[in-house]
Image: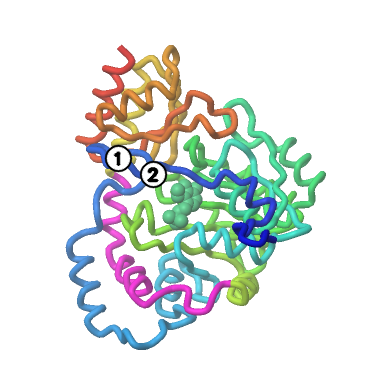
Amino acid sequence: MTGARGRPRPRDDVALMEGYHSPQVDVAVRLNTNESPVPPPPAFAAALDAELADLAWHRYPDRAAADLRRAIGELHGVGPERVFAANGSNEVLQTLCLTYGGPGRTAAVFEPTYALHAHIARVCGTDVAVGERDEGFALDLDEVARVLGDNEPAVTFLCSPNNPTGLVEPEAAVRAVVELAPGLVVVDEAYGQFAPWSALALADDDAPLVVTRTYSKTWSMAAARLGYLIGPPWLVEDLDKVVLPYHLDSVKQAAGRVALRFRDEMEARVAGLVEERGRLSAALADLEVDVWPSGANFVLFRPRSVDGADVWQALLDRSVLVRNCASWPRLEGCLRVTIGTTEENDRFLAALQEVLA
Ligand code: PMP
C-alpha cells in the first residue's frame, strides 16, 4: 500500500477519479448551483431559535429522527416507516448505493444526467452502465430496455426534472422503467416541486421504487444539508443498517421539522420562480442561443455562435456565475443558469446580451 515513507495510495479506482467540481466563487450574481435565491422567512429562524433553546447538547440526537420523519411523512401522506432522511439527498443516494450497489453490482444511468449518480455509485464500488438519452435528451425506452437487459442493474437512476437539462420524465416513461428494471429504481426529484407531476404517486409499500427529495432547493435550506426519500418500509430498514449511527444531528432534525411549518411560503417561492423561469426562458429564446424547456429552477442553453466556455468566462468577468456544462457528456458548449431573483435574472440577461453582441 505504501513505500517506506511513501504516501498511502487510495484505492486504484479512486486514484483514477476526477471528483466533482463546482467552483464556489465570490460574485454579485450566483446562478450556478440551483439554490433558492432567497432565505426561508424570518419566522422560520425565530421558531428554530425557540426550539434550540431547549436542545440537549450533551446528548446524542434521536437516532431514528422519529419526529422529523413523522413530519416529512405527514407532508407526503405516508407513515414515518416509509421515510429515510440523511445529510442532503446526496447522502441518501450514497446510502442507497452502499446498501444495494457495491462490488459485483451495477447501477444504470442515462446521460446526460446528474453527474453524482454515477460518481457516488463508483465511489461505492458499483459498476456503472451508461445509457444514452435521445436527441432531445428524453429517455429512449428501447435504449432503457437494452441497458437494463444487458446489465441487470441493481439500481437504476432516473432524475425528474433532470439535471442539467430541466426535462421532466413523462409518467408513462417512469412507469415503463419500473416495469423493466430488475432491481431498485431511484427517481431523484431534487427539483420535484417545480414540476407538474411527481413519481411519489407511484411509490407504495411494495414497489422497488424510491423518490428522493431535498431541502436544498425549494425549502431554501442548502446550508442545512438535509434530504430524504420516500420508499417501502423494508428498504428503510435496510438503509438503517448501513447509515452511520446518529448521522442526523439534533440541530438539523429540528431545522427540518420547523421548516415544514412554512409550506405555504415555500409554495409561494416556487410559484414565483416558475414565473421567472417562463420570463427568463422567453428572453433567452430571443437571443442567439438554443434553449431547452425546463420543469426545474434552472434553464439549459447553448450559445450558437460563441463558444460556451468563452461566454461562461465573459459572464464571470461581469460578476455573473452560471454553470459550465462542457464536461457533461453531449453538452459541449452548454451553460446552465439557475433562476434567481428578478433583479439577478435581469443582470444575467443584460450581461449575456452584452457578451453575445
Ligand atoms: N439530485 C440532484 C438532481 C441535484 O441537482 C442535487 C443538487 N445539485 C442533489 C441531488 C443533491 O442535493 P443535496 O445533497 O443538496 O440534497
Q: In the rendered structure, are the residues bearing label 2 and label 1 in contact, judged by CB atoms less than 8 Å apart? A: yes
Dot 2 surroundings within 10 Å: few (below 14), some, or many (20 or more)? some
* Residue 244 locus on image (x, y percent): 54, 74
Rendered image: mark on residue 164: none
Q: Is residue 112 depicted above or below 103 in this figure? A: above
Q: Which quarter of the rendering shows the N terminus?
A: bottom right
Q: Position of residue 54 (x, y in %)?
A: 25, 85
> Going 51% across and 40% down the picture, which residue do you hit?
168
Q: Element under label 2?
A: loop
Answer yes or no: disc 2 within 8 Å of ligand 1.
Answer: yes
The residue to which callout 1 is attached is: 30
In the figure, is residue 175 to the left or right of 70?
right
Mark 2–mark 1 distance (CA, rounded to whole Å): 8 Å
Q: Is residue 32 above or below residue 182?
A: above
Q: Is residue 357 placed above or below 101 in the rendered structure?
A: above
In the image, the segment drawn in magenta is 243-271
Q: Quadrant of the C terminus?
A: top left
Is residue 197 at least partly visible in the picture?
no
| Side of 264 relative to 78 (left or right) | left
Q: Classify 348 as above or below 59.
A: above
Residue 4 included in the magenta stretch of the image: no
Q: 177 or 12, which is in the foreground?
A: 12
Dot 1, how many residues are within 10 Å of its Cα: few (below 14), some (14-19), or many (20+)?
A: many
Give the residue number, with chain letter if any, for mark 2: 33
The type of residue carrying mark 2 is: Thr
Residue 2: name its quadrant: bottom right
Q: What kind of element bears circle 1?
A: strand
Q: For the residue marked with disc 1, what is the amino acid?
A: Arg
**Outermost residue, right side:** 150
Q: Nearer the viewer, residue 310 or 133?
A: 310
In reply to whether residue 260 is colored magenta, the answer given is yes
Q: Is residue 258 visible?
A: yes
